[in-house]
Image (cartoon, rainbow, N blue to C red):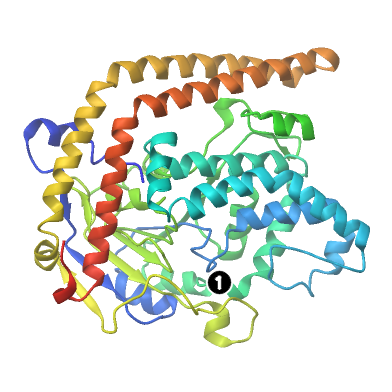
Amino acid sequence: MAISRRFRSPSSATSGEPRARVVDRLVIHPDALDFRTLCERAIRPETRYLVLDLDRTFHFGRNLGELLGWELCAYAAYGPDYLRARRDSRKPSRFLFDWSRPWAMSRYLARGARLWAYPGLLYFFMVKLGTRIGPMRRWLYRRFGVDPIEAVQQVPRTALMHHLSDVPMDTLRELARDIWVRFQGDQVIQAADLAWLRERCPDLRIIISSASPQPVLEAAAAELHVDDIFYTAVEEHDGYLSSPYALHRLFMLLRPPRRISPPSRVHVNAGEAKMARLLERFHDFADPSVHTVGITDTSYGEDHAWANYFKTVIDINSPTPFAPIVAATSPLREIHSARVLTKAELDGSAPGRSGHGRTPSFAAAPRSLVSADLLARLDRILPRVEDLLARYSSEADAISESRKRLDARIDALLADIEREVDSFNSASGPERHRALLRLYRYSRTNRRLHRKVAHIERGMASVTYALTTLFEASRAMVDRDPETATA
């Protein structure tokens, strides 16, 4: 987890005031419950903005963007007519094996391996395993910088965007809608729940903000009737999404891009970029009088920055719940943690995953802790957080000039890429191939510059790693019984 810019507020650094504090209230809901019950307990009627993540938040344990990537493999191997014929009989699985069609299935397996082996294995080892193995996790911060999860997730995300550019947008929307329906048993938030919530909160604006691509968010908006959606975006041209400008030899060898999206048309809606978009679009979002709520599963801590922007945050079905320590300047007052039941678990009428083996483990009785309770439990951790934040500021100041120079080089390179993308999109024949090779060289330079950024930020990344472990420890301490909670 990268340190939120609110932790790095220069006002707190110069005035000597605390950089961090505990929240006013943390509520751990012990029993699995339905979404409406959670809303009654955690969302005030005067709430104006409700922002929800998508993947694994609406569907327990499911990433719809990843599922769309696998569906593209099935679309290419089996064909659209076959998928439509199987639409009502398919089970909720990311894979589609049909032994009665051996040649189509072999194409499906070969395409899946070719397109997803490298991004999938990188994600598995670096994120799924790397975040659970202490020495490897520390290495991830040294190698990728202050936000290693986002750096690694960018690889499969870019791969997915390249593959989406093969298929017309109308087809992508159709596939995304089919996925939504097929996995409805895993839904924990239904359209009817949001309609009920609007009646309870008359001024409510409901927003979904996700790193998933446009067709996935559009399918969600159509199903749920939300007010706004924010997604990872690239240029759309003639009914197709363009390939992102980040090029790897893997994609060049598989298929040269049909069209490339320039840097100015690419927006990765992940991490604090989600918050930047919200603040830019809704000018009253940060108004102290406006009540805001954020709901996410925050699977790998990627949405922990939300705790420094909302009045209330709610983590549902989350293995890495929000920590009770936030920036001193944060508007956050309440954190809620809950296990929310899926449609299949509630009514048993639809196929879906069971709730067995969920994490984290909750206490046997309701637990609501106010700031005094939290301070009593975290009195040893909070000073260590303050010390690390001071060290982080010192590290950032020490490299500020070097970082500015690198940022200037990256900005200049992106301007070159912008011009080269225009050349590629307007060229044909050999000139188009030469433009692609130049873009590939620019992409290598871009990756090299970002590795230099990670290198000079190693001191900051080391502090971020230490802070992340402290935040996790602070949450673990309040999850335990008082007599076992020691620093």
Question: Which one is nearer the viewer's eye here, 45 or 25?
Answer: 25
- Residue 407: x and y, percent? 41, 19
Left or right: residue 432 versus residue 41 is right
- Residue 107: x and y, percent? 86, 52
Question: Which one is nearer the viewer's eye here, 106 or 443?
Answer: 106
- Residue 178: x and y, percent? 72, 64
Q: Is residue 432 above or below residue 82?
A: above
Q: Quadrant of the C terminus?
A: bottom left
- Residue 370: x and y, percent? 14, 68
Q: Residue at x 32, y 48 (%)?
A: 285
- The residue that mark 1 highlights is 187
- The extreme front residue here reads 135
Q: Residue at x 93, y 57 (%)?
A: 103
- Tally of numbered discs: 1
Tell me the amino acid under the disc marked 1. Answer: Gln
Q: Is residue 86 above or below residue 364?
A: above
Dot 1 lies on which element? loop
- The extreme bottom residue here reads 348
From where the camera sits, is residue 144 visible? yes
Q: Residue at x 65, y 65 (%)?
A: 180
Label 1 crowding class (10 Å Cα cut-off): few <14, some 14-19, many 20+? many
